[in-house]
Image (cartoon, helix red, strand yellow):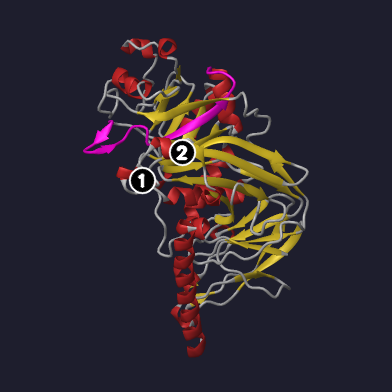
Amino acid sequence: MSLISKKHLYRACGLTVVPALVVFLAFSSAVFAQTLVNPYEGIDWGTINQYKANLHTHSLESDGALTPGQAIDEYANRDYDILALTDHRKCTYPWEDWGRDPVALGMLDIPGCEFSNHNHLNGFFIDYTTNPNTEVESLTEIAAQGGLAHLNHPGNYWNPDSAGNVPDEVIRKYIAWFSDFPPSVLMGMEVINKTNLHPEDEKLWDALLGVMMPERPVWGFANDDMHGPWLGPVRLVEVSWETFLAGSLDATAIRNAMLNGSFFFSTCATQLDPGFWDVNQVPKITEILHDEESGTISISAISGGAPLPESDYKWISMGEVVQTGRVLDYRNTDGVGNYVRAELEGTGGTTYTNPFGIIRDDGRLVVYVSPADAIYAGAKWKIEGAAAWHEHADTVQLAPGNYKVIFGRADSYQTPVPITVTVTANKTTLVTSAQGAQYVYDPAMTLPAGGGIALALSGLALLLAGVRRANHRHTA
C-alpha cells in the first residue's frame, strides 16, 4: 500500500487535494508497471510549426470595448496565428463582415461563442447558439454541431472552504461535467484567465487530474479573455496564450491538436508586477522527448533566446513539485501518481505543459472528509486492518479489490459509519460526503480534555505545515 498525500493543489480543491493540511509522503512508483500516455507523442520537433492563439476574445458585439475588426487587429499586429472571437451568446463570424480577411492576415479564424447563461464556457467550431440555460444544454448544443468546448474561468464560481479546501460539492460538479461529456466535446478548462485572476484554478486542475487521469484527460488553457487592450497602464492583450503544435495552419490540424492536447500554454501574469511582463522572457518549449525504455521525459526550452536554466523546470504530480530539472524519471521518482506535468518559470512569466498520463496496474483510493471544521477537529480515515491513519484528501495506492474505509473520532462530531469501496486497476475511487464521508456536529461527542488539546495542537501543526509547504511550492 502506497500513500500520496496531496497538499498544495489538492487541499484547495477538496477533491483529491488538501493544500495546507497534508504532507507529501514518499511513494515508490516502481512497485507497479507503468506506461506513459503522452500528448506530444509523434511530434517531430525539428519540423513542427508552433502557432500562437487566443481563444477567448470579446468585442462590441457583446461587452468588449473594440469593434470586431479592431479586436482582430490587436492580435494580428502582435503576430498571433489563431484567434477566436467569443462574444457572449452570439457567434461574431465571419470576419469578412467586419472587413478582415483571415487568409490575407495569415491567421486562422475559429468561429466561437461564450455560452454565459450559467457557468461560462466557450464553444469552438460552431456557427450558432440558441442561448441554452444550463451547462449540460450548452454542451449538448455544441456537441450537436460537432464543436469543441472548454470551461471558462472556473474561479468565478467557487471559493475555497474555511479550511482552504476545494469544497466537496465543487469537485463533484466538475467531475460530473467531465464524465458526462467526452474529451471530444469538453476538452478541458482555463487554468489561466486574463491576468491570472484565479490562481486557485491551478489547484482545481490538479485535483481533477488526480482523479480523472489517465482515462479522461483534462487539457489546460490560458487566454486573455480580452474585453479591452488596456486597463490604465496595464496591458490586457498578449498576457495569456496557447501555442498549438501542428503541421499546418488550418482548422483540421488545429482541431486535432486541441483534441490530442498537443499544445502548451503560457502567461506573463505569474509575475505579479506587470512591469516585469515580458513575452520574450516567457519560456518557449523547443522539444519534449519520451524515452520509453528508460522511463524518462525530457524538456528543452528557451527564454529570451537563451536556454532555460535547469532549476526553472518543475515537474508536478498530484499537486506537488516532485522533481526539478529538465529530465524526469517518472518510474523512480517519489510522489509520481497517475499523471505528471511540467511548469517552466522564466523571468517574464510561466509556461505549462499538458499532463502526461501514467497507466498503472494498481488503483487509487481518495477520501474527502466533510465538513472543514471536522478536519481541524482531527477527522481521519484508514483501511480496515491497516495500521496507518490518513488525512482528508490523501490518496492511497491499492491492489484491485474490495476494502472497508473506517473513520476516526473527531472532537464534537459524530463519526461516519464504515464504507465498503471497490478499487479498480488504473482508476480512482473517490469517496466524498455523497458516499458517507460526512461528520455531523454534535457537541455531546466531546473527547476527553487531553485528547481535545492534542487534537487542537495537531490541527495547528498541520495548518502551519501547510502554510510552509505552500510557501515552498511557490519558491521552489
Few, some or many C-alpha atoms within 10 Å of disc 2 (few <14, some 14-19, many ≥20)? many
The answer to whether residue 313 is left or right of residue 291 is left
Foreground mark, 1 or 2, reads 2
Q: Is residue 165 above or below residue 410?
A: above
* Residue 266: mark in rendering: 2
Q: Secondary structure at mark 1?
A: loop
Give amino acid for label 2. Answer: Ser
Q: Is residue 114 above or below residue 118?
A: above
- Residue 3 located within the stretch drawn in magenta: no
In this figure, which residue is indicated by the disc labeled 1? 197
Residue 131: where, in percent of width, then height? 39, 27
Residue 369: where, in percent of width, then height? 54, 64
The answer to whether residue 80 is left or right of residue 65 is right
Residue 122: where, in percent of width, then height? 44, 31
Whether residue 98 is visible, yes or no, is: yes
Q: Which residues are magenta?
A: 228-250
Give amino acid for label 1. Answer: Leu
* Residue 207: mark in rendering: none
In the picture, residue 269 is in which quadrant?
top left
